[in-house]
Image (cartoon, rainbow, N blue to C red):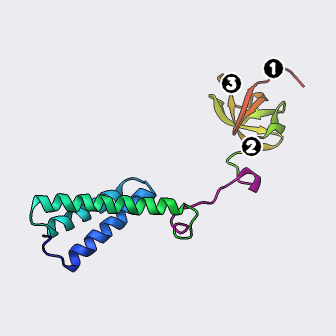
């Protein structure tokens, strides 16, 4: 029924199934899935001599692939067999991993615009150069500014009208 099984067809078939399994467990850009599909199709084309045999082999391949995925899924992502494939570390806030730090201490501080703010630029607040953003107004270089709010990494300022 199935014709010429040689080492090339077996390697292509097994490598294709392996790549399809990797794509099934860790979906990505599809490179592994497309390459795996091409390997399986080429091996099936080399093995079979008729369309009927090719269809049977494709159905058997799909069944084997689904079975492999179900077994690996049932083992769970925490199993020792999948630990080397799947990243399970988390960068938690409690461990010190943060993308931004709110500098609430800047609220109400007065500084000087070091560059023109249109609406963002650099200001010197308490001797420190910080990136700031005006509330939408253009503020000239050298103008006195006051910090009105801090939103994540953005320090929002407005022109200071009062004299000290």
Q: Is residue 46 left or right of residue 157?
A: left
**Total numbered circles:** 3
Q: Which residue lies furthest to the left in this view?
A: 50
Q: How far apart are marks 3 and 1 (CA)?
A: 15 Å
Q: Residue 135 carries which label?
A: 3
> Is residue 90 inside the magenta stretch?
yes
Measured from the top left, where is residue 112 in percent x and y? 77, 33
Measured from the top left, where is residue 11 in percent x and y? 27, 75
**Disc with the residue nearer the chain's start (3 vs 1):** 3
> Is residue 28 inside the magenta stretch?
no
The quarter of the image holding the N terminus is bottom left
Q: Which mark is residue 161?
A: 1
Please name the residue that numbered disc 2 is placed on.
129
- CB under 8 Å between callouts 3 and 2? no
The quarter of the image holding the C terminus is top right
**Label 1 crowd bin: few (<14), some (14–19), many (20+), radius 10 Å:** few
Measured from the top left, where is residue 52 in percent x and y? 12, 59
Residue at point 77%, 39% (across, down): 124
| SS at mark 2 in the image | strand
Q: Distance between the residues labelled 1 and 2?
A: 21 Å
Q: Nearer the viewer, mark 3 or mark 2?
A: 3
| SS at mark 3 in the image | loop
**Disc with the residue nearer the chain's start (3 vs 2):** 2
Residue at point 19%, 65% (across, down): 44
**Disc with the residue nearer the chain's start (1 vs 2):** 2
Q: Which residue lies furthest to the right in this view?
A: 164
Looking at the rendering, the stretch of residues picked out in magenta corresponds to 82-97
Residue 22 is at least partly visible in this image? no
């Amino acid at each position: 029924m199935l014709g010429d099984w040689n080492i090339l067809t077996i390697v292509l078939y097994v490598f294709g199934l392996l790549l399809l399994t990797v794509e099934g467990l860790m979906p990505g850009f599809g490179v592994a899935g497309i390459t795996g599909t091409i390997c399986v199709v080429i091996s099936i084309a080399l093995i079979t001599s008729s369309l009927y045999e090719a269809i049977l082999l494709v159905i058997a391949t799909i069944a084997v692939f689904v079975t492999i995925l179900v077994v690996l899924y049932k083992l769970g992502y925490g199993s020792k067999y999948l630990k080397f494939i799947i990243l399970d570390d988390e960068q938690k806030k409690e461990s010190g991993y943060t993308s931004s730090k709110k500098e609430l201490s800047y609220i109400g501080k007065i500084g000087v615009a070091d560059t023109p703010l249109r609406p963002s630029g650099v200001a010197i607040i308490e001797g420190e150069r910080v990136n700031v953003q005006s509330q939408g107004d253009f503020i000239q270089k050298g103008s006195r500014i006051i910090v009105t709010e801090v939103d994540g990494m953005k320090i929002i300022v407005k022109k200071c009208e009062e004299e000290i």
